[in-house]
Amino acid sequence: MSRGGISKDRDDGPERKCIVTGEVQPKFGLIRFVAGPEGQLVPDIAGKLPGRGVYVTSTREALEKAAAKNLFARGLKQKVDLPEDLPGLVEQILARRVVDLISLARKSGDAVAGYEKVKAWLDKEEAETLIQAVDGSGRGKSKLSTPHRGHYIGWLTADELGMAFGRETVIHAALASGGLGKRVVEEAQRLRGLRETDGGRGRREG
């Protein structure tokens, strides 16, 4: 652990301290914030903006508490102007990021959409992550199983998945192992904490 216990690096990646909970946890589960040139609070989703930053656990509750208790100004050591709906803004940015990553995975051949294609990947054990639209039919979604020791993402909408695959809507999708799969899963987990529902879970094997 580094001096003061603020951050440390481990085998599963760097860790940072949440200004709300005081807990040190993997950085991919947190949202970094910096102060912009005009003193506005800026969500640094990619974690690459220059300057002093603070970290908040990626949940609606944590963001609302940080705003209500003036923790951003305290952590950044300056007055900052907060957007009217901070959790909503962060959710919107994260959703766009997840959609863009899935789109990149599709273009590189590491993602497919459509029930039959997804089922074929699952049957051949080529899929590591099953993605299903939160607003898709529960009966239809229950026919596909989350890959053994794989991942499930069920809190994107059919419209959002459609954007990722260049279609109007998509209900079923899958990611192969490797490639951008890990990044998609990590960013989707951050998004999950900001969504009011997790969309349930796919039917697991066993």
Image: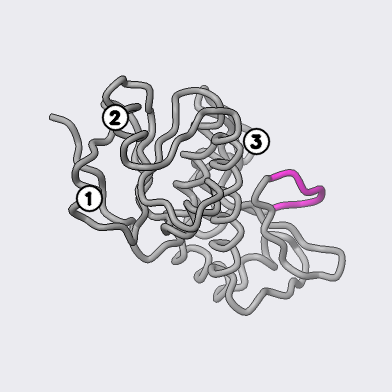
Per the rendered image, the range of residues in magenta is: 47-53
Q: For residue 52: magenta?
A: yes
Q: Earlier in the sequence, mark 1 or mark 3?
A: 3
- Give left or right: position of 64 versus 201: right
For the residues labelled 1 and 3, the Cα–Cα distance comes to 52 Å
Give the residue type at disc 2.
Answer: Pro
Instruction: Give residue 81's position: percent from left, percent from top.
Output: 73, 75
Q: For residue 23: magenta?
A: no
The numbered disc on residue 140 is 1
Q: Which residue is mark 3?
A: 3
Q: Residues within 10 Å of mark 2 (few under 14, many from 20)?
A: many
Q: Residues within 10 Å of mark 1 (few under 14, many from 20)?
A: few
Q: Which residue is mark 2?
A: 147
Q: Which-is-in-front pick, marks 2 and 1?
A: 1
Instruction: Give residue 54's position: percent from left, percent from top.
Output: 66, 54
Q: For numbered disc 1, what is the local secondary structure?
A: helix
For the residues labelled 3 and 2, the Cα–Cα distance comes to 41 Å
Quadrant into which the N terminus falls? top right
Q: Which-is-in-front pick, marks 1 and 3?
A: 1
Q: Residues within 10 Å of mark 3 (few under 14, many from 20)?
A: few
